[in-house]
Image (cartoon, rainbow, N blue to C red):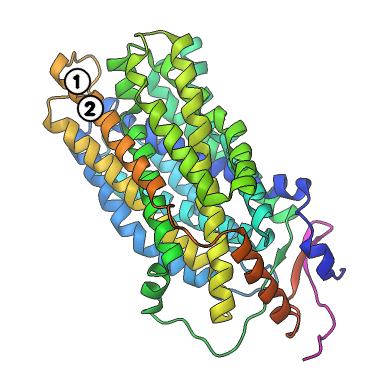
Amino acid sequence: MTQAPPAARARALPLSTAFAFAATSLPISAVAIAISVYLPRHYASHLGIDLALIGAAFFFVRMIDIPIDGLLGWSMDKTRTNWGRYRIWTIVGAPILMAGIFFLFMPPEGVGRTYLIVWLLIMYLGNSILTLSHVAWAATLAPHYDDRSRLFGIMTAIGVIGAAAALAIPIINEARGASDAGNVATMGWFIFALTPIAVALVVWRTPEKIAPEVAGHQFRMRDYWALIARPSFARILLADLCLSLGPGWMSALYLFFFTDSRGFTTGQASILLAIYILAGFVGAPLMGRLATKISKHRAVIVATTGYSLVLVSLMAIPKGNMLIGAIPMFMAGFLAAGFNVLTRAMTADVADEVRLEQGRERAGLLYALTVMTTKIAGAFSIGLTFFVLSKVGYIAKEGVANTPEAIHNLELAYLIGPVAFVMLGGACMFGYKLGAERHADIRRQLDERDALYDEAPIIEVVSGEPAIAVPPQASR
C-alpha cells in the first residue's frame, strides 16, 4: 500500500490504466448495437411478434427503467466500501446483465410480449448499473478538463471494438451461408462471455479515489430539479437527448432502410454499419483531441453540423454499391463518435462544479440523469418509429414485398427526424459557459479545499486485490 501524492494525482492518467479501465465499454457497446439494430428485427421477423407490440414493449420497459437510474445514481454516490464506491457496483451489474442477455437473446419458441418485457427489464437494469458506475468512476479517475476528453475518447474507441465484434457476427454468418435467424443467439453468447472478462480486468487493474465530503449538505428530492435547472447541465441534458434520439431513430430503422431502400443484403448492410462503428475508433479520440483545442461545446457544434450534412447524402448511394456507400457511412460514424465523448466529459465538469458548491459527490446522480435522456430517446426511437411504420403500410415480415409508397415513407422516417434532432443538439451548445478556464478555477478551489480535510482513501490494486491506502492526517 502506498500513498499517492497530490502531484501524482494531478498528472495525466497513464495510458495503460485508461485502456484497462475502458474494458467495460466492450460489452456495453456490444449490447447497444445488438439491442438497437438486431434484436427488435429478430423478434419481428423470426418470432413473428407484431411491430407495434415490439415498439410498445421497448417503450414500456424504458419508461419503467428511467426512474430507476436516478435511484441507482443516488445509491452509488452514497456508497463507501473497502472496495471503493463505483467498483462494487460494477461487480454487481455484471451478473444481472448476463442473465438478461441469456434469456433475451436465446428465447424459446412461442414467446410473446410479456417474456420480452420481463427480460428487457432485467437486461436494462444490469446495463444501467454497469454504464452508470463506469462513467461516474471515469469522472473521478480523470479529474482535469483535457484529461477527461482523452479518457472518454479512449472509452468510446474501445467500445467501438465491442460493437464491431458484434457486427462481425452477421457478416461472418452470411459468408458461411448461415441464415439470419442465428445471428442474435450468437451475439448473445458473445456478450455473455465477454462481460465477466471485461469487468474482471477493470476491477483488477483500475484504482479508485473516493472524494472527501464536506459536512452539512444532505440531498433532498427537490435537489433533482435544482441539478436539472442548472444552465450548463440543462444544455447538456437537452443536447444529449437530441444526440441520442437522432442516431437511435436511425438504428431502429437501419436494416429496413439499407435492405429495402438501398438494395443491400443483411450481411452487406452489416458491413456498412461496421464501417460506421469502426470509424468511431478513429473519430472518438480525435474528437476528444479537437475538444482540447477549441473546447468541448464547440467540438459538439462541429460534429453535429458535419453529421447532419452527411446524412442528407445517404439517398444518393446507388443501390447495392458498397464502395460508394462506405464513404458517407465512415464520415457519419467518425463524427457521431464525438457525441457521447463530449457530453459525458462535460457532465464530469458539471459534477466538479456541483461538488464545489455542495461539498458532496454527485457524479453518479448527474450521470443517471444524463443516461435517463438516452433511455427516453431509446424508448421513443424504437416505439415511435415502429408504430409509424406499422401505420404507413410497411410490413417487416420476411418474404413480404412492400409497396413503393411504403418504402418512400420508410426513407422519410429514416432521414428527416435524425437530421432535425442532431442539429437541435448542436444548437444547445451555443452560449455554453463551463469552458476550460472556468473548470480550471473550479479544480483549483476543489484541490485547495480537499487539502484542508483528511485525504480520502485511495482504493489501489495490490497483487490483484483492492486495498485502502490511508494517508496521514492533514492539518486543518
User: Of the numbered discs in the image, which one, if any, rests on residue 408?
Assistant: 1
Visible in this render: residue 458? yes
Q: Position of residue 195 (x, y in %)?
A: 58, 44
Name the image quarter holding residue 426.
top left
Visible in this render: residue 47? no
Determine whether 205 is above or below 185 in the image. Answer: below
- Total label count? 2
Identify the residue at horizontal 16%, vertical 21% (top origin).
Answer: 406
Q: Nearer the viewer, residue 80 or 392?
A: 392
Q: Which quadrant would the N terminus be assigned to in this image?
A: bottom right
Q: Position of residue 468 (x, y in %)?
A: 78, 72
Q: Nearer the viewer, residue 44 or 326?
A: 326
Using residue 119 as the reference point, say whether residue 451 is left or right of it. right
Identify the residue at horizontal 55%, vertical 67% (top origin).
Answer: 351
Residue range highlighted in magenta: 461-476
Image marks 2 and 1: residues in contact by CB distance under 8 Å: yes
